[in-house]
Image: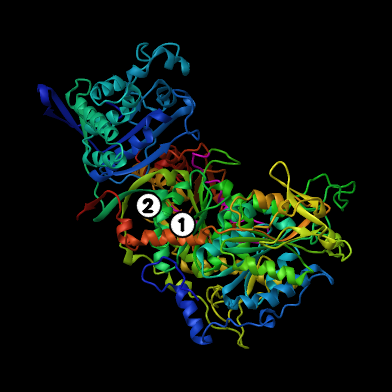
């Protein structure tokens, strides 16, 4: 447990004191957890067969490996099916209001840099009503991890199209097909200059865990788009990628430092096009030196953006893995630094502050 | 002289053998008016600082357009600053000016109607050019056509005299001209015997990176002062003795400044770091500016992407154990409503500052109004009670901020603090408090660190039996992990609950918690010197000054009136109903269409007489006095009420 840098004179603050008192009672922080330590007594209330179960299980089995105590983790969510997530995690949590989780988490992470802050959100929550908060959280680079469950539909309101639904989608609110062009969440995040952007599939435990691990270890805002099947209102949305027969053909696995070769027998690959972008080619039609070697650490976001644009709205050529992972100072660390710098001139003196400016004395 | 009354001439001599007299006054109201680019607000603030440090009591009323720079010389571009200062305590910036300084024809046209006949009018004659006159529709030049005969008009070439004074400064004409406000300030400083060192120091500080500009402004300031001393245009100067005030150290303070300092003090007195989440909005932004300078106190300021993120971040910080604050104006409160509801449901402390302005919609961003009271009370979905408190004067914004934090922390609730544009930008002398005497907010914090349930579990919605505040455990506290959120909470456990009886119980409990705050607030503040008035005037917020000034006039006429002023509007003081029932007539002046009156009528079945205006300006004391007098004379015929006729 790091000391909470609250920049207050005459520490400890009530926050420090409360944490210290609880440690006296509980002994040292328990950082060696098992998956079951993270479960709560609340009955999980997603529809049977929902992709959210798989994600919950993956997160519960993976989190203990981070070595963070339960009380130091906070999960903040918005509104939607995915946003029930905090109730099922034995950490601190807030199930907030529609779209605002990144804003709430920003305040929490900035005020309490000692915590591990997570946001769980969905495609409607993060990209429609909360789009503004998402892009600003990403550009600020506050230290938190955002899990965006993308099922390409509104589930909790029973099946309207979402900002990631494909054009022409027939839903309850679009009987003749939707007219909106979908967002590509990864493109959006890279456009907002996010320092960490990854994508994973709900049912791919290994791939999901690997992206989550890198996201959690990243200092700054991490965005992980998780393709999640809604078996009630949009069943099979990701079948093209999940089906063992078609998945390998259309999935581009991203491995840092590895050439972008994919498909059965590595038949396809990614090369540069004539305009600075990327395109898919047949491996046997190009020279090996032309094949792009994946580099998630490029400062310039245009490569990661080009990568995100390879996929079509029907999910052919979908890169999965970590698109971008760059180092940049995080917001709360810089904020703490400013407070520290201000205190180098001396801690705040309330009497001096109140008596600041021109004053005069009135005597009896 | 009619406007500046009670002259007692005393001759004095000035250099050059000129005999000048000094007239002693008990109070003066000056209005400075010019183009937005003329620096009238700065000039007014400097004159205010000089006046405050001299020891007069004062109140100010800055009045400026929402446009940063409307086209030069036009009516929409006129900016003004009025202040009243006196040798006794004053409650308002004055109903009408005694002295009007108009820097151009537009300023004259926009303000002349409010200068009573015989008042002193000082004009910059250089600006009365055909072009400038045409801009505001003057067919003839008022300096020449005799239309200003009803006033004591002194037309002075302020611009060219400033240019003459700065001839050797090395500045270009355009740049040198900009110092004419300091020339004017110098002239006024001479006229009213103001101390000048503070302004010289201020200019040196303000332009420390541009010494030539500092020197030019100081030269213009001194030239204006010397001009007053030597010119024959001004034969009289005025003396207003310092006002008796309670012993202590004083400073001049605006409402926004006092509010910001109150929040810093609340952080210090609670031990909690202050976290401000805010989005820039007129007239609240100065609180953000001020707080951003106090990082040494552990104050974090976060300029959010929008109003919703501002309050969201503040609530997130509160969840983490900080004193979360968000500052805004009416349109921002509308956007924050859903998050305020979340704070009601999660029962976390949060201070929401609404510096009210004219509405609805964008309304009058730079003008004052009190029309957000019902929004503060009810502007949320569901039964979402929120305590509402309001400061009564610029300096009182400090105490109101500390009180808002007290309630928020002790009751784990969002609190609405309703300031307004008049308080925010207005200024007054403020007795600097002894920090040791400020309320100790530390006991209100009380973070939970031990399980409170019978089976060793933590129950986040188990309440303090007295305050009904729930247990507040912060992340990082081992063994206390819990989840909160916007869905209805089960009593004690805080788990999601759709149970009908639980929802009914929790709804009533949240209301009872807010109602219970009344037990910790002082009884109703009633000012009724003889204790037998039959008419009461009740107000809240910034109408305190104008109502108080009106009450003085009424009492001066021999009539009796009680002034009741509310700091707490939700809940009301416990004895308010009983107090109101004592009077035959209750008048409620408000800068809205009767919002407090509606609440009083609903709660106490009192036939409140609502008196309202929404002109974007504070009430005039004379106008209120007329309303009150009318009520008194209706209740008690004048012959019987002891009034001096």
Q: Is residue B368 magenta?
A: yes
Residue B453 at what x, y percent from top left? 60, 84
The residue shown at (86%, 65%) is A231
- Distance of label 1 from label 2 (alpha carbons): 14 Å
Asked whether residue B186 is drawn in magenta, I would say no
Which circle, 1 or 2, is nearer the viewer? 2
State the mark number for residue B439: none
Q: Residue furthest left?
A: B17
Residue B229 percent across, percent down from the top left: 18, 27
Report in which chain the residue with disc 2 lies. B
Q: Nearer the viewer, residue B266 or A159?
A: A159
Q: Is residue B386 visible?
A: no
Relative side of A114 to A309, left or right: left
Q: Callout 2: 10 Å neighbours few (<14), some, many (20+)?
A: many
Task: Decide which of tag 1 and tag 2 comes sooner along the chain.
Answer: 2
Pointer 1 local density, CA inside 10 Å: few below 14, some 14–19, many at least 20: many
Residue stretch in magenta: B365-391
Is the residue B549 above or below the residue B213 in the image?
below
Q: Is there one chain holding both mark 1 and mark 2?
A: yes
Q: Residue at x 58, y 51 (%)?
A: B307
| Residue B525 horizontal/vertical position (percent) | 42, 58
Mark 1 highlights which residue? Answer: B567
- The secondary structure that dominates the magenta segment is loop
Query: In this rendering, would B345 be left or right of B526?
Result: right
Position above or below: B560 against B157:
below
Instruction: Look at 26% across and 30% down and name the residue there.
Output: B216
Nearer to the camera, A337 or B644:
A337
Q: Are marks 1 and 2 in contact (CB under 8 Å)?
A: no
Label 1 residue SS: loop
Residue position marked by numbered label 2 in the rendering: B395
């Amino acid at each position: 447990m790091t000391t909470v840098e609250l920049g207050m004179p005459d520490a400890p603050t009530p926050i420090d004191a409360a944490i210290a008192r609880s440690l006296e009672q509980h002994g040292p922080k328990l950082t060696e957890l098992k998956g079951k330590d993270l479960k709560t007594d609340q009955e999980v209330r997603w529809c049977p067969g929902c992709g959210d179960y798989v994600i919950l299980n993956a997160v519960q089995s993976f989190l203990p490996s981070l070595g963070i105590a339960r009380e130091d983790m906070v999960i903040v969510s918005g509104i939607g099916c995915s946003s029930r997530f905090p109730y099922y995690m034995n950490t601190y949590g807030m199930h907030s209001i529609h779209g605002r989780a990144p804003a709430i988490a920003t305040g929490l992470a900035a005020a309490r840099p000692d915590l591990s802050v997570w946001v769980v959100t969905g495609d409607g929550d993060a990209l429609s009503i909360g789009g503004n908060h998402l892009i600003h959280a990403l550009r600020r680079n506050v230290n938190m991890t955002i899990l965006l469950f993308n099922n390409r539909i509104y589930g909790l309101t029973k099946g309207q199209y979402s900002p990631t639904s494909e054009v022409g989608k027939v839903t309850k609110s679009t009987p003749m097909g939707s007219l909106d062009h979908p967002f590509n969440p990864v493109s959006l995040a890279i456009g907002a200059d996010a320092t960490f952007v990854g994508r994973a599939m709900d049912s791919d435990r290994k791939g999901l865990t690997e992206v989550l691990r890198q996201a959690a270890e990243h200092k700054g805002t991490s965005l992980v788009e998780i393709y999640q099947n809604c078996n009630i209102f949009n069943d099979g949305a990701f079948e093209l990628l999940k089906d063992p027969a078609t998945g390998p053909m259309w999935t581009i696995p991203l491995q840092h430092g590895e050439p972008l070769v994919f498909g059965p027998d590595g038949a396809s690959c990614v090369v540069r096009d004539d305009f600075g972008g990327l395109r898919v080619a047949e491996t046997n039609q190009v020279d090996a030196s032309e094949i792009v070697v994946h580099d998630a650490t490029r400062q310039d976001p245009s490569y990661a953006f080009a990568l995100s644009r390879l996929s079509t709205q029907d999910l052919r050529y979908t890169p999965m893995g970590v698109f971008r992972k760059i180092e940049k100072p995080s917001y709360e660390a810089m904020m703490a630094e400013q407070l520290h710098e201000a205190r180098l001139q001396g801690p705040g003196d309330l009497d001096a502050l109140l008596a600041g400016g021109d004053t005069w004395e009135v005597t009896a | 002289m009619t406007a500046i009354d009670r002259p007692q001439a005393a001759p004095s001599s000035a250099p050059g053998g000129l005999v000048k007299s000094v007239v002693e006054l008990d109070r003066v109201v000056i209005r400075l008016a010019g183009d937005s680019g003329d620096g009238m607000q700065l000039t007014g603030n400097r004159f205010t600082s000089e006046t405050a440090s001299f020891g007069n009591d004062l109140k100010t009323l800055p009045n400026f357009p929402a446009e940063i720079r409307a086209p030069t010389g036009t009516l929409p571009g006129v900016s003004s600053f009025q202040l009243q200062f006196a040798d006794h305590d004053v409650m308002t910036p004055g109903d009408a000016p005694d002295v009007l300084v108009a820097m151009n024809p537009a300023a004259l046209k926009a303000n002349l109607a409010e200068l009573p006949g015989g008042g002193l009018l000082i004009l910059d004659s250089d600006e009365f050019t055909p072009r400038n006159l045409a801009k505001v529709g003057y067919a003839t030049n008022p300096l020449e056509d005799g239309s200003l005969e009803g006033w004591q008009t002194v037309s002075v070439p302020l611009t060219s005299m400033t240019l003459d004074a700065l001839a050797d400064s090395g500045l270009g004409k355009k740049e040198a001209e900009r110092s004419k406000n300091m020339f004017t300030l110098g002239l006024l400083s001479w006229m009213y015997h103001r101390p000048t060192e503070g302004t010289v120091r201020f200019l040196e500080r303000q332009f420390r990176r541009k010494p030539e500009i500092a020197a030019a402004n100081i030269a213009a300031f001194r030239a204006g002062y010397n001009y007053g001393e030597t010119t024959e245009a001004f034969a009289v100067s005025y003396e207003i003795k310092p006002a008796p005030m309670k012993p202590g150290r004083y400073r001049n303070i605006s409402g926004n400044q006092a509010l910001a300092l109150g929040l810093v003090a609340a952080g210090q007195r609670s031990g909690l770091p202050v976290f401000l989440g805010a989005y820039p909005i007129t007239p609240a932004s100065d609180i953000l500016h001020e707080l951003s300078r106090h990082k040494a106190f552990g104050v974090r300021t976060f300029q959010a992407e929008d109003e919703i993120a501002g309050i969201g971040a503040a609530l997130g910080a509160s969840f983490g154990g900080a004193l979360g604050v968000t500052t805004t104006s009416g349109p921002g409160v509308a956007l924050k409503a859903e998050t305020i509801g979340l704070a009601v449901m999660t029962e976390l402390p949060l201070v929401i500052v609404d510096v009210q302005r004219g509405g609805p919609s964008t309304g009058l961003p730079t003008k004052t109004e009190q029309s957000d009271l019902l929004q503060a009370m009810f502007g949320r979905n569901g039964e979402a009670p929120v305590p509402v408190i309001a400061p009564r004067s610029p300096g009182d914004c400090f105490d109101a901020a500390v009180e808002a934090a007290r309630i928020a922390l002790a009751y784990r609730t969002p609190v609405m603090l309703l300031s307004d544009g008049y308080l925010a930008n207005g200024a007054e002398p403020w007795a600097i408090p002894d920090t040791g005497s400020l309320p100790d907010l530390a006991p209100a914090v009380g973070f939970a660190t031990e399980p409170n349930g019978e089976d060793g579990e933590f129950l986040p919605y188990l309440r303090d039996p007295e305050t009904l505040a729930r247990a507040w455990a912060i992340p990082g506290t081992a063994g206390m992990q819990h989840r909160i959120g916007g869905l209805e909470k089960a009593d004690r456990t805080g788990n999601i609950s759709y149970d009908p009886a639980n929802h009914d119980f929790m709804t009533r409990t949240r209301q009872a918690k807010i109602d219970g705050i009344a037990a910790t607030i002082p009884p109703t503040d009633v000012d009724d010197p003889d204790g037998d008035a039959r008419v009461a005037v009740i107000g809240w917020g910034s109408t305190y000054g104008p109502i108080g000034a009106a009450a003085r006039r009424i009492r001066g006429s021999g009539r009796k009136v009680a002034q009741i002023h509310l700091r707490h509007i939700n809940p009301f003081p416990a004895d308010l109903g009983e107090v109101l029932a004592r009077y035959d007539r209750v008048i409620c002046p408000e800068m809205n269409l009767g919002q407090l009156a509606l609440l009083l009528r609903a709660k106490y079945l009192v036939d409140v007489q609502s008196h309202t205006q929404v002109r974007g300006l504070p009430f005039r004391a004379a106008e209120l006095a007329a309303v009150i007098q009318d009520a008194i004379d209706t209740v008690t015929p004048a012959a019987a009420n002891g009034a001096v006729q």
